[in-house]
Image (cartoon, rainbow, N blue to C red):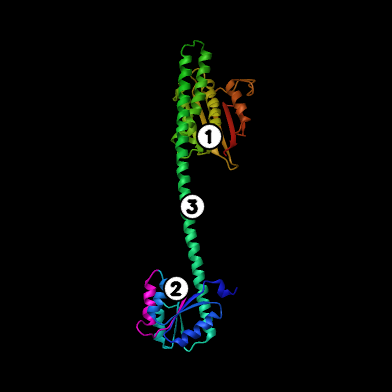
Amino acid sequence: MSQAQEMQNNILIVDDTPENLTVLSRMLEAHGYQVRPAVNGQVALKAISRAVPDVILLDIIMPGMNGYELCRRLKADKQTREIPIIFISALDEVMDKVKAFAVGGVDYIAKPFHAEEVLARVHTHLALRNMQRRLQTQNVRLQQEVKTRQQMEEKIGSALKEKGLLLQELHHRTESSMNIICSMLRLQSSGVRDANVVQMFKDLETRVRTIALVHQRLYQAENLSHVDLKDYIYDIGILLYKNYKTNAAKVELKPTLESAYVSIDSAILCGLLLNELLGNSLKHAFPEDRTGEIHVTLRPLDSGEVELRVKDNGIGLPKGFDAKKDGIGLQLVRALEQSSLKGSVNYNTGNGTEWIIRFQSA
């Protein structure tokens, strides 16, 4: 198949001279083009209404409707305005050519014409016309793809919004359930006379409330996948001071907290760590109304880890202290060291006690 035959090649020739129609038709048909002749503008309009051509060869001087007027009418109609119109005329003045381009023509061939020139111009404009059609088809396809993608994004956005609302409700219900557990623990401990058992109930309650706090944070947050430890740790400090009825004038809490975003699992584990360390400082570091300070420091490290420090200037750890054996709270610290935080727990003594916890933020 020739290059001409591969293209859409329906050509309309409009000329009132039969000899010109015959010569042009034979020449173009010999090169594989489908040709329709029209002897004037009215005949051309009827032919176009039946089948829109791919290119039009148009004479200018014709009886009734001349070539300029026919071109104007075709360019005014959205169904035919994209048809390439090549004027082919004996008029050879500059102004004639200017007028032809002004009314919408894409090219101008002067009579007497040369077959090679006509074929070259027709081939060029058919190629441009087919390229334009392909671009229009691609544009329509792209517009449809964009529309489809927008619809999918809207569906995904709606699904994510619904999921977010469900997760918020889940966190809210989890928090409420934990508050109920705390109330039951407090009720259960109200009839206990043994101070150690009462303290055990209180410690359990603070651990549950520590977990409930992170769900409260998530219920109130827009981002349900990560928690800012800065706000969470501050909340835990306030909770522990309240639960242990600590006099803030005698034991001052000094937080130095930077934002550090972690997953909910990491936040809960970190909160339990802080609960044990800060709780032990409040319970044991300042006996007999001793005054002092507890510094809680949080900062992200360049290594991608998060560092949490709890330091007091209290009486320090007892002689022979073993973090692996002494107290359920400190046992929990050592257990959490081996948990999914994949971090480390270390401590220093001297002028009080300092605990250093490091773990990956991700």
User: Identity of the amino acid at label 2?
Assistant: Ile
Viewer-nearest of discs 1 and 3: 3
Residue lying at the far left in this picture: please name it: 64
Above or below: residue 127 compared with residue 212: below
8 lies left or right of 102: right
Residue at image location 37% in from the left, 76% down from the top: 72
**Cα–Cα gap, marks 1 and 3:** 32 Å
Give x and y (percent) for residue 14.
43, 81
Q: Which residue is mark 2?
A: 83
Whether the magenta-drawn stretch holds residue 269 is answered as no
Instruction: Return the disc, 2 or 1, that comes first in the chain's sequence.
Output: 2
- From the viewer's side, name the closer residue of 49 and 334: 49
Crowdedness of circle 2 by 10 Å Cα count: few (<14), some, many (20+)? many
- From the viewer's side, name the closer residue of 39 and 313: 39
Residue at image location 59% in from the left, 22% down from the top: 317
Q: Which residue is mark 3?
A: 149
Question: Is the N terminus in the top left, top right, bottom left or bottom right quadrant?
Answer: bottom right
Q: Which residue is mark 1?
A: 264
Instruction: Return the disc, 2 or 3, that comes first in the chain's sequence.
Output: 2
**Residue range highlighted in magenta:** 52-78
SS of the residue under disc 1? helix
Viewer-nearest of discs 2 and 1: 2
Above or below: residue 38 compared with residue 188: below
Give x and y (percent) for residue 225.
51, 38
